[in-house]
Image (cartoon, rainbow, N blue to C red):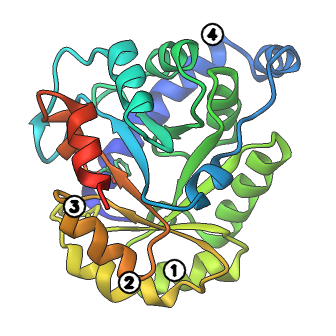
């Protein structure tokens, strides 16, 4: 596993142990019974037109502070009104200044499907995601061996959650497809260096069969970028920084998805 990723996961494991003691899994499971049904993330991404998963992100390891304070409710409502297909909410605390509470806050104000964006390696995190109002979770190929990936994917599906499976190399795409991924994201960002290269997405998108949902992730800055990725087969786009740096993220989204 790569270095930055390793540090993030190590910090996350320490915190997870504390959360598990504070709120046992059985308690979270009881909470799930009273929840409204999961919203259809997959359907949102495959609707006709330019479908964007708009990401609420306050900071990142490579860019430092991106948007602070993160006005979760205002941003969620504005992005929904401006045509986002779904929202991605960063919940990693140490490097992205996110939190599960941001997911809960977004859930209260929008009807859009929500993705828990985090570094997931444990079923407990998937229970937390559903309890906080998520409709989908991210699973990152670079940090999971196939058996772990399969186990977490099955668990998410058993709760009705969709899984966005993320790859950065041809080998990772093959692993995900061999293990039953149906929504596959190609991340332009290398998680060891955090450098981005849209060329990687352009090169790899064609390796995902058209019966899968194909998502172009990271480094999308313009309407032309989205159109290029669409031509290469992308069904949907995951966009964080370009929206979060905009004075008006809603206007920026309209500009990005214009015909
Ligand atoms: O801000 P950008 O370049 O538009 O990227 C968004 C999203 O793809 C990125 O935040 C991301 C993709 N995969 C991740 C895994 C963990 C943390 C973050 C990510």
Judged by depth in the image, the label closer to the viewer, 1 or 3, is 3
Pointer 1: what residue? Answer: 173
Q: Distance between the residues labelled 4 and 1?
A: 37 Å
Label 3: element kind? helix
Between 229 and 83, the residue placed more toward the observer is 83
Establish if 93 lies above or below 173. Answer: above
Residue tagged 2: 232
On the image, numbered disc 3 is attached to which residue?
Answer: 223
Q: In this view, does 205 lie above or below 101?
A: below
Number of numbered callouts drawn: 4
Residue 34 position, x and y percent, is 85, 14
Residue pointed to by mark 4: 22
Is ligand 1 closer than 8 angstroms to the Cβ of mark 2?
A: no
Neighbour tally class for label 1: few under 14, some 14-19, many 20 plus, Cα within 10 Å? many
Q: Alpha-carbon neighbours of circle 3 within 10 Å: few (<14), some, or many (≥20)?
A: some
| Nearer to me, 158 or 83 | 83
Position of residue 122 in the picture relative to residue 50 (left or right): right
Distance between the alpha carbons at the discs numbered 4 and 3: 45 Å
| For discs 4 and 3, the disc positioned in front in the rendered view | 3
Q: Name the quadrant of the N terminus.
A: bottom left
């Amino acid at each position: 596993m790569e270095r930055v990723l390793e540090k993030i996961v190590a910090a996350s494991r320490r915190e997870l142990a504390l959360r598990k003691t504070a709120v046992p899994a059985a308690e979270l499971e009881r909470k799930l019974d009273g929840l409204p049904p999961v919203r259809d993330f997959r359907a949102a991404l495959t609707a006709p037109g330019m479908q964007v998963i708009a990401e609420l992100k306050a900071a990142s390891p490579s860019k430092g502070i991106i948007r602070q304070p993160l006005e979760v409710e205002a941003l969620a409502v504005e992005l929904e009104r401006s045509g986002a297909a779904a929202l991605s909410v960063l919940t990693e605390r140490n490097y992205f200044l996110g939190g599960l509470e941001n997911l809960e806050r977004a859930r209260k104000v929008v009807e859009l499907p929500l993705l828990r964006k985090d570094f997931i390696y444990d079923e407990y995190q998937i229970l937390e995601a559903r309890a906080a109002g998520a409709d989908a979770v991210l699973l990152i190929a670079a940090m999971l061996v196939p058996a772990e990936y399969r186990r977490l994917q099955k668990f998410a599906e058993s709760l009705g959650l969709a899984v966005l499976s993320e790859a950065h190399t041809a080998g990772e795409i093959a692993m995900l497809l061999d293990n039953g991924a149906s929504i596959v994201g190609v991340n332009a960002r290398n998680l060891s260096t955090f450098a981005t290269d849209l060329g990687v997405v352009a090169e790899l998108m064609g390796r995902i069969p058209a019966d899968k949902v194909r998502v172009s992730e990271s480094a999308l800055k313009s309407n032309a970028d989205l159109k290029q990725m669409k031509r290469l087969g992308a069904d949907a786009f995951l966009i964080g920084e370009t929206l979060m740096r905009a004075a008006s993220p809603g206007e920026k989204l309209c500009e990005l998805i214009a015909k």
